[in-house]
Every structure is written in structure tokens, then in C-alpha cells.
Image (cartoon, rainbow, N blue to C red):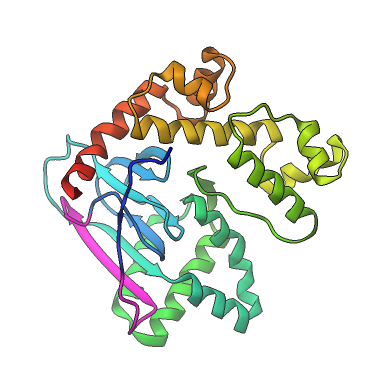
Amino acid sequence: MSIIQPEIEIVDRSRESIRYLQHGWPSELCRWHSHREYELHLITETRGKAFVGDYIGDFKPGALYLTGPNLPHNWITDEVWAQEVPIRDMLVQFRQSSMDAIMTAFPEFTELKPMLDLAQSGIEFVGFDPKTAILQMEKIRELRGVERVVALLQFLVLINKNSNKTTLSVSKLMQPEGGKKARIGKVIDYIVNNFADEISVKKAADMTSMSPTTFSRNFQSVTGHTFVEFVNRIRIGQACSMLYATNDQVSSICFDVGFQNLANFNRHFLKMKNMTPSEYRQIAQKELAPQVREMQ
């Protein structure tokens, strides 16, 4: 079951590898969409709701995000904000192939790779100075050619070193490669494709030829979550998709995604999303469904 389908944006990159955009609110550019590029996105005005994959959360001035390729996203200002805003969003889009080429040519830039991997699920950078973010965006806006590329790289390095990174959506996951990480990646792939089944630590450990204790330690080091937490995140993420796209009863969705009782499902959902499943559905369908109807 997929989430409400985003509009796919095609960006011409034949002449430049980096694209800078800014726009106000309201704007036709504020829509549920995705594209092949990474997007570094700064909110400068208003408050409202951020939609990134299956994530819904609050944003305010100074909020800074990085979304990965093909990850749908949108930022919707609260209705109480009646006044038009000339510049609400400052953003930069850049290609994964460009970053791969830079990291191949200059291995020092591989320190950015973990951040770019996390961006597959969307990142909010917490604690980064908003004034610095605006200055960096303005620099990228004013520069051209090689200087613009250098300015973007400097900005990414600054963010990587001077912020806490909060991952947002569980609908896209990094697949680890190589050695133990490859075996953990196999388990991740299995969980994603079999989330509704009963999945025990022992069964997962057997898939990696590790003891349950060793597996649990390695799994947490790779994903940042215990095995049970991770399985629950996948299930809640899938539940979000079903809440977006269907009118199925919450109790039915609970069992469809692998939870064994409704109370447990509601507790985990509230802990992870800071709202109930019904509240999540109400927000998602109210804010995103009208945009989808307009595109059809």
C-alpha cells in the first residue's frame, strides 16, 4: 500500500549541477512532490506542518532539512497565517551523481556520506544557527559556476559538523553494504518485505549466522535502534502509508501491519508520531489529499 502519490518534478540539469530556488507563501511551488535530486531546504518565515515521506511534524523559522532523491516532501503554513510572505523557503537542489563524483575525486568529502545516506529518510538539522543558514543560502544564490559548488560544499560541511541530525521518515531506509553490514542489510530487507509477519530476534540472528546477542549489538550499531524498535518503526511507517491512502479502520490497519493488539499499536504510534493514528489521518488527508485531487 503506497502513500498518496506525489507529483514527480523533472529538473533540467544539462547546464548546471546545482539549482537554487526561493519562494514565498502562498506559492504554487508548495505542493506534495518528489524529484531525483537532494534538496537542502531552509524555512525563513511562518510556522506550519512539514511532510517528509511518512513523517508529519511542526516547522518554524530557521528549520533546516535535507531530503534525499525521490523522497516526497512539502511544507504547509498554518491557516492562521493570513499575511502573504515574500520569501518563506530558500532551497538548493543537487544531484547524487555529482556528490559521488566529488567523493571519488576528493576522498576527504566522504565524511559527508553518512549524512547523505540518512537523507534518504529525510533529516532535520537541529541546533544549527538560523542566521548562518540564511547567510550560506544567500551566498549560494549570488555565486555562479565553480564558486557556487564550493559554497554548497562548505555549507554541507558546516551543517554536518555543527548540528544534531533527526531522521524523519521510515518509508525509505539505507541498505548497508559490506561484511556484517551486508548481513544486517539482508535482515532490513526482510523486515521491510515481511513486516506483517512475526519476526523474532532469533530468526533474524539465524539469517546473519550470528548469535542473538552479537546480532542485537551489530544491528543497533548499524541502524541506531534496537531490533524491536526498528521493526516497530517499519510497521508504524507502513501504517502511516495506509492512513494516508485508505479509509480502512484503524483497528484493521493495526493488525495488517503486524501488531497483535490495538492498545500496543496506539501506544507505539503516539510515542513515535506524537499524535494518535486518527489525528495523523486527519492531518494528512486534509493537507495532502486536496493537492492530489488538483493534480489529477
Quarter of the rendering containing residue 175: bottom right
Q: Is residue 25 left or right of residue 34?
A: left
Q: Is residue 288 magenta?
A: no
Q: How far across and down, in percent of the image, does residue 219 sit?
A: 74, 43
Quarter of the rendering containing residue 285: top left
The structure residue drawn at horizontal position 34% and vertical position 82%, both measured from the top left corner, is: 14
Front-most of residues 191 and 26: 191
Q: Is residue 282 left or right of residue 123?
A: left
Q: How far across and down, in percent of the image, does residue 82 sit?
A: 12, 40
Q: Is residue 24 magenta?
A: yes
Q: How far across and down, in percent of the image, does residue 286 sit?
A: 24, 32
Counting the numbered discs, the total is 0
Q: For the view shown, which residue lies furthest in the left direction?
A: 83
Front-most of residues 215 and 207: 207
What stretch of residues is rendered in magenta?
A: 11-29
The structure residue drawn at horizontal position 70% and vertical position 44%, both measured from the top left corner, is: 187
